Amino acid sequence: MLKLKEFFECEDGAVTVDWVVLTAAIVGIGIAVTTLIANGATDVSTGIGASLSSASPVTLDFTTVTAGN
């Protein structure tokens, strides 16, 4: 019975558990933020791609330019 009492009173592993939980929370937040940024970047790049595909190139006619003007 004495060993069981010592086991419950021992706090040697408590700090390790705290660090594991804290690290897991930080990793989870990092994954969530990365997902949000990736989804936003995909939406923006899709919009830019649509705008560029519907745009027509500008053509310039330099044959009408005369010297001295």
Image (cartoon, helix red, strand yellow):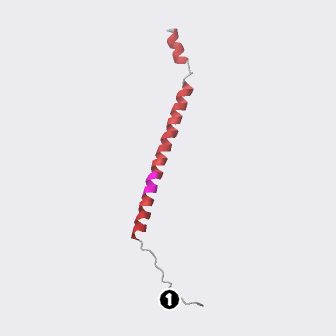
Vertical position of residue 7 compared to residue 69: above or below: above
Q: Position of residue 10 (x, y in %)?
A: 55, 18
Residue drawn at x 50%, y 39% is 27
Q: Position of residue 55 (x, y in %)?
A: 42, 72
Instruction: Give the quarter of the figure containing the C terminus.
Output: bottom right
Vertical position of residue 56 compared to residue 30: above or below: below
Q: Please name the residue that numbered disc 1 is placed on.
A: 64
| Label 1 SS | loop
The magenta segment is: 38-42
Amino acid under disc 1: Thr
Q: Position of residue 51 (x, y in %)?
A: 42, 67
Residue nearest the viewer, comparing 50 with 20 = 50
Vertical position of residue 15 compared to residue 62: above or below: above
Residue drawn at x 45%, y 48% is 35
The 10 Å Cα crowd at callout 1, few under 14, some 14 to 19, many 20 or more, is: few
Quarter of image, res 44: bottom left
Q: Position of residue 1 (x, y in %)?
A: 49, 9
Residue drawn at x 44%, y 74% is 57
Residue nearest the viewer, comparing 32 with 6 = 32
The dominant secondary structure in magenta is: helix
41 inside magenta stretch: yes
Query: How many numbered callouts?
Result: 1
Residue drawn at x 43%, y 53% is 39
Which residue is farthest right? 68
